[in-house]
Image: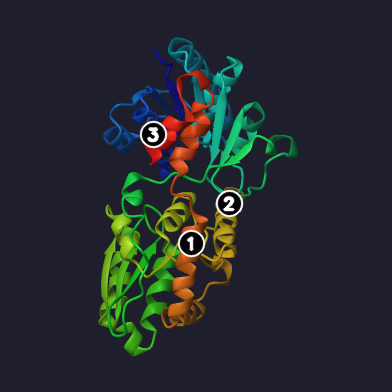
Amino acid sequence: MSRPFVLAAGGTGGHVFPAEALAGELLARGRGVHLLCDGRVDAFARRVPEVEFHHVRAGRFGGGPGQAVYGLAEMAMGIMQARRLLRRLTPAGVIGFGGYASVPSMLAASHLGLPIVIHEQNAVLGRANRLLAPQAQRIATAFPAISGLRRADRLRAVHTGNPVRPAIIALADAGYTMPEPGRPIELLILGGSQGAHILGEIVPPAITALPDELRARIRISQQVRPEDRAAVAAIYQQSGMAAELDSFFDDVPMRLCRAHLVICRAGASTVAELAALGRPAILIPYPHATDDHQTANARAFAEAGGGWLLPQASLSQDLLSRRIESLLTDRTALIAAAASAARFGRRDAAQRLARLVLDLDPGAARPTDLAEHAA
C-alpha cells in the first residue's frame, strides 16, 4: 500500500488554498493525505473531507518578552506533537506551505530525515520558508523569480505556479470580452476577506467623479469593511450608481469571471486567480505586508503586462479616477492586459506541484498517469 503524504498549512487562505488544491490532486491519484495544522481550516475540511486532520500547536512570535517565551514554548510542544504524528504516519513526503503554522511540522520532518517540499506563494520568500529552505529537497515557487532565496537553494527551486481553488479553474476557459458601446461595465473591488479601509475611502469618490456617460454604465461589486459600508453606500447612492456592497462575497470566482476590470490588493491568491482567469487589474498592495511581499507580487504581475501597480502611499482620488477612466475607454489596453494576465498564470499549477511531490516517492507514481489525470 502506498504511503500517504503530509501537508503542513494553516492560517490564511493564501496558505490554505494551494494545500487544498494539492490535496485534491493527490487524492485523485489514490494517495492518502493528512493535514497537520493549527486548527483554522474548517472550510478546508468541508471541501476535502477525505483528508485526515491533526492539530499541531504553533507559536507566534513578536510582541514583548512574555509573548516570545510563550511562542517558543508553543513551538516546542508543536514540534513534539508533529514528531509523534510523523513517526506513526510514516509519510512518503511532507509538504509545507509557509506561515508560522507550518514550522513545527516541517522542523519535525527535517529532524526525522523525511523528504520535504516547500511551496512559496509570494514573489518574496516568506520567513518560515526562508528558515526551512535549506532542508527542502525541492522549493516550489508561484512566481518565475522570487527574492530572498539563497544562491545555494536556487538549484532546487522549481516554478510550478500557485494552485487556485477548483471554483476558479472551472471558469478558466471563459474568455475576456469588453462590453459593447453603451453596455454595462462590470467593476470589481476586492480588499481581502474583510475589505480594505483605504479602498472604501478612495475608490467610491474616484468612481463617482468619472464622466456621466461612463459612470452610467458601471456596475460595481465592492468588498467593504462592515464599519465602512454605510458611508460607501451613501457615496454611490448620491451619484445614482448601482453598487453591490458586502464585507464578504461567497461567489468571488463568478464575480471575477464577469469583471472587466478589478481593483484589489496583491495577495498571492488574488494574483493567482486574476492570472488563471485572465482578468486585468489595478493593484494597490497592502504596504505593511511582511517584507512588502504584496508590492513584489504586484510588480511581477504588472511587469508581465497583466495590470497596473498603484502604491498606496501615492494613491489619491484624482489619480485613481484618471486611471480608471483611461482604462475603461481604451479597449485595446484592457484586452491586451487580459491576455498578458492569462499568459502569466499557470492553470495546471496543482498538477505541476503534484508531479513534484510524487517524485518524492518515485516507485508509486508514473508521470504518464499524472499527465492523463491532468488531461
Seen at 56% across and 18% down, the residue is 114
Against 335, residue 183 (above or below) is below
Residue 275, image x, y percentages: 46, 57
Render colour scheme: rainbow
Residue 296, image x, y percentages: 60, 55
Seen at 27% across and 54% down, the residue is 251
Task: Tell me the residue that label 1 is attached to.
Answer: 341
Residue 19, image x, y percentages: 43, 36
Give, as a three-letter code, the residue at label 3: Glu
Give, as a three-letter code, the residue at label 1: Ala
Gap in Å between the C-alphas at discs 1 and 3?
24 Å
Task: Tell me the residue that label 3 is attached to.
Answer: 25
Within the image, what quadrant is residue 149 found in? top right
- Residue that sits furthest to the right in the current view: 151
Seen at 39% across and 24% down, the residue is 33
Q: How many marks on residues? A: 3
Helix, strand or loop status at disc 3: helix
Question: How would you rate the neighbour count of disc 2 (Cα within 10 Å): few for under 14, some for 14-19, many for 20 or more?
Answer: many
Helix, strand or loop status at disc 1: helix
Work out whether mark 2 precedes mark 3 in sequence or the reverse, and give the earlier one: 3
